[in-house]
């Protein structure tokens, strides 16, 4: 009996101790600069949103300055999804939440300044500082994508676009610097701003020379009756920028964009001593 | 909820303790068991079932921190249990089990995978149980059981994740084969002891305490 109990105990222990079950598969191994990619994407979106505002403003200015006979064509070309309205002292695009106050001046006039507003706040100014050159300044703005609280002082210079296609006016060379506090929430259902300091990062960027932002098609925006994408986005395609992330400590990221290809933008990201190539 | 399960636990314990006031011989059943897929509190914290309820995207900070680490497989030890049961009636046993279940996971640093940390959970449960034997022969018994008790889960990574709560085990079908030394298996089960359990046990009779009149 004692031998039987001992044998059964031994077999029981061997069987049970070797029966560990995987209840959740682990992650696949991540790239060393994956965290840097996430931060870079948010910086690119932030700058791209301001460049997009500037692009819309320049197109609006040129549409206002255009002869009446050309306005219809330009409206179809540059604003296919919006209806332009002039209300009080501001221009609005129907279905867009922001508006432009022009002060009665063209954005191609040196030192002319437009204000971009959202609700009761006007936190973005666009000023002509030279031929095809504008400065964009914002302070405490939530205009940018994902409702990050942004500050920026950047200069955009219009260049001949890399890609041809209706609706594209310029690519832009961007220089300057800015920073933003990330939104503490990323709600799928609706955009809200959450300033909970326990769940935010402060990200700042600096462009020493210039980074070219290319107007390129957004591949996820095809509509059934159109051959080309309905929306376009501005993406950093060429140049270098430095990024700092303030978390518990401060991390530095260096981004070097090489070129825009059919597979996406080829870029190098350097993070914690590791440099990796990304194409997307 | 807390008052209710404390009340049920108290009734269970009183029933178990009341056995000691009765006279005669009583069969005692001691068993060691092992269960697969025990229900533990960490299963509802995003490892198994929790993620489906979180429909919001991650914030930038959460995504950034997630990218700085990646996790290995989460492994369950299963549930090791020790139980003692007293036959109150021919068809009913009262008793309790103490059990341990662990889940283990290694978290790797993305930039330097040699840097790791552990994310382990250790769960201990005390589960008073009533067993109903609906087929009783000398060598084969079939039964169902209901257990309700208390448990605690300790995290190796963050003391804030420690939890206490109920322990529940419902068994639809259990079978034991053997007279004194027996093997058993329980299926159609759900609870902290596991979906399927098996093990071995030993039965013996004890003289019970009686007051002299």
Image: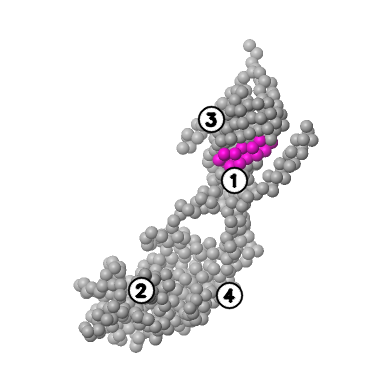
Asked if residue B6 lies left or right of residue B25, the reply is: left
Q: Are marks 1 and 3 in contact (CB under 8 Å)?
A: no
Gap between marks 3 and 2 measured at Cα: 71 Å
User: For residue B198: magenta?
Assistant: yes
Looking at the rendered structure, the secondary structure element under dot 4 is: strand
> 10 Å neighbourhood of mark 2: few (<14), some, or many (≥20)?
few
The structure residue drawn at horizontal position 33% and vertical position 74%, both measured from the top left corner, is A124
Q: Residue A181: where, in percent of width, then height?
A: 43, 67
Gap between marks 1 and 3 measured at Cα: 28 Å
Q: Is residue A248 above or below residue A177?
A: above
Q: Residue B37: where, in percent of width, then height?
A: 59, 45
Residue indicated by mark 4? A275
> 10 Å neighbourhood of mark 1: few (<14), some, or many (≥20)?
many
Magenta residues, start to end: B184-203
**Which numbered tag is attached to residue A226?**
2
Residue indicated by mark 1? B37
């Amino acid at each position: 009996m004692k031998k039987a109990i001992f044998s059964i105990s031994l077999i029981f222990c061997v069987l049970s101790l070797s029966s560990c079950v995987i209840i959740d598969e682990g992650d696949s191994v991540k790239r060393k600069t994956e965290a840097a990619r996430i931060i870079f994407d948010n910086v690119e979106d932030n700058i791209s949103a301001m460049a997009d505002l500037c692009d819309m403003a320049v197109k609006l200015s040129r549409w206002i300055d255009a002869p009446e006979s050309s306005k219809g064509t330009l409206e179809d070309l540059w604003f296919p999804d919006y209806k332009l309205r002039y209300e009080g002292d501001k221009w609005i695009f129907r279905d867009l939440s922001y508006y432009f106050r022009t002060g009665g001046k063209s954005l191609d006039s040196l030192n002319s300044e437009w204000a971009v507003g959202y609700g009761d706040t006007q936190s973005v100014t666009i000023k002509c500082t030279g031929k095809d050159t504008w400065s964009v300044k914002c302070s405490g703005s939530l205009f940018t994508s994902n409702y990050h609280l942004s500050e920026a002082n950047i200069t955009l210079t219009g260049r001949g676009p890399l890609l041809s296609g209706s609706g594209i006016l310029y690519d832009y060379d961007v220089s300057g610097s800015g920073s933003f506090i990330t939104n503490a929430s990323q709600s799928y259902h609706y955009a809200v701003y959450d300033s909970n300091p326990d769940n935010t990062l402060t990200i700042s960027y600096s462009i020493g020379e210039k980074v070219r932002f290319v107007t390129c098609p957004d591949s996820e925006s095809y509509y059934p009756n159109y051959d080309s994408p309905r929306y376009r986005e501005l993406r950093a395609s060429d140049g270098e920028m430095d990024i700092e992330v303030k978390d518990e400590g401060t991390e530095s990221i260096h981004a070097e964009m090489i070129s825009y290809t059919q597979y996406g933008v080829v870029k190098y990201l350097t993070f914690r001593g590791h440099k990796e190539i990304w194409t997307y | 909820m807390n008052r209710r399960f404390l009340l049920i636990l108290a009734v269970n314990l009183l029933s178990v303790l009341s056995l000691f006031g009765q006279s005669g011989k009583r069969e005692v059943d001691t068993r060691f068991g092992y269960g697969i897929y025990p229900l533990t509190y960490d299963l509802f914290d995003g490892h198994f079932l929790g993620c489906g309820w979180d429909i919001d995207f991650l914030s930038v900070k959460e995504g950034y921190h997630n990218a700085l680490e990646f996790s290995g497989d989460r492994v369950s030890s299963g549930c090791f249990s020790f139980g003692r049961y007293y036959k109150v009636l021919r068809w009913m046993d009262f008793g309790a089990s103490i059990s341990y279940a662990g889940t283990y996971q290694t978290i790797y640093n993305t930039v330097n995978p040699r840097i790791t940390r552990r994310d382990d959970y250790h769960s201990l449960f005390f589960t008073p149980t009533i067993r109903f034997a609906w087929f009783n022969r000398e060598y084969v018994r079939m039964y169902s059981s209901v257990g309700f008790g208390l448990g605690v889960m300790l995290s190796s990574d963050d003391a804030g994740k420690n939890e206490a709560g109920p322990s529940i085990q419902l068994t639809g079908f259990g079978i034991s084969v053997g007279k004194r030394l027996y093997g058993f298996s329980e299926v159609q089960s759900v609870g902290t002891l596991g979906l399927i359990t098996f093990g071995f046990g030993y039965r013996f009779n004890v003289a019970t305490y009686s007051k002299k009149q």
